[in-house]
Amino acid sequence: MKIDKGDLVNMEYSAKTEGVVFDTTSAEEAKKAGIRHRAAYGPALVAAGKNQVIPGLDEALLNAEEGKTSSVSIPPEKAFGERSSQLVRLVPLQQFHQQNVSPKPGMVLELDNRPCRVQSVSGGRVRVDFNHELAGKTLDYTFTVKRVFKKPEEKVGVLAEKEEFKASFKEGIVSVPIDAKDAEATGMAVKKLRFMQSCFSLIPEVNKVKFDETYSRSEIKA
């Protein structure tokens, strides 16, 4: 099945640079590589052509087919860009001490609301690098599109499943039934907002999202 811009796809992938795995959807691959970047492993849900992944992988997705494994080598300009010397700065050590931080080489910190990596600490100054850690590198992806979701009702279903909802779609309206016990669950407000934003941004056929909460007398404590 051909993949079009805006389709939702479930994809499995492993990504390497210089022969070393730095990201994967496979728990087994992650264990072998000694990395852990995910709370949960398994196929990733991605909107093809919607800038949810790096440009080179986005392009490769639109040329892929459901069920087939593809490999693509992505140059820096279509990944995390080239390294820039202007993004390497010297910062007074005192600036970190004022925040009760003792910087050490290799540490990833936040400075000026941006992540940076400490390169060295010497003479009361700290050399920090604001370049992405993969800047300047060619990335090699091997990926398989496990399933493609094209119809609006399919997209609604898979987005709802991601948030542990059940939802239906009819005449531009998404309906999500929520029981009282679920409505009071921690993080429910965030999940509802995230689902609603995903529906509106990824499914142009969606005009309204309705959350139908139902309460029974036995579930309400005086």
Image (spheres, rainbow, N blue to C red):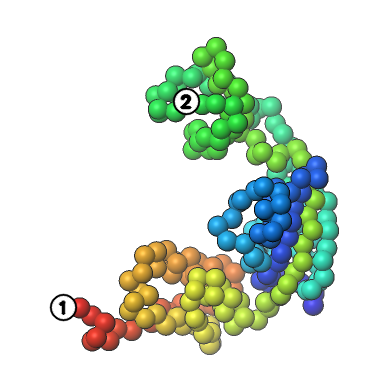
Image location (x, y in percent) of residue 77: 77, 44
Image location (x, y in percent) of residue 176: 45, 80
In the displayed orientation, state which residue is furthest to the left: 222
Instruction: Give the side of residue 221 with respect to residue 90, left or right.
Output: left
Image mark for residue 16? none
- Residue drawn at x 40%, y 27% is 100
Which image quarter holds the N terminus?
A: bottom right
> Which of 200 and 160 lies nearest the eye of the viewer?
160
- Residue drawn at x 71%, y 39% is 135
Q: Earlier in the sequence, mark 1 or mark 2?
A: 2
Q: Secondary structure at mark 1?
A: loop
Residue under label 1, please give it. Answer: 222
Which image quarter holds the C terminus?
A: bottom left
In the displayed orientation, state which residue is furthest to the top: 123
Image mark for residue 102? 2
- Residue drawn at x 83%, y 58% is 71
- Measured Cα–Cα span from mark 1 to mark 2: 52 Å
- Residue drawn at x 62%, y 62% is 41
The answer to whether any part of residue 200 appears in the image is: no
Q: Is residue 106 above or below residue 14?
A: above
Q: Is residue 31 above or below residue 85?
A: below
Three-letter code, disc 2: Ser
Few, some or many C-alpha atoms within 10 Å of disc 2 (few <14, some 14-19, many ≥20)? Answer: few
Q: Secondary structure at mark 2?
A: loop
Residue 115, quarter of the rendered image: top right
Image location (x, y in percent) of residue 96: 45, 25
The answer to whether any part of residue 209 appears in the image is: yes
Few, some or many C-alpha atoms within 10 Å of disc 1 (few <14, some 14-19, many ≥20)? Answer: few
Instruction: Give the side of residue 148 with respect to residue 221, left or right.
Output: right
Image location (x, y in percent) of residue 117: 59, 32
> Which of 194 and 166 lies nearest the eye of the viewer?
166
Three-letter code, disc 1: Ala
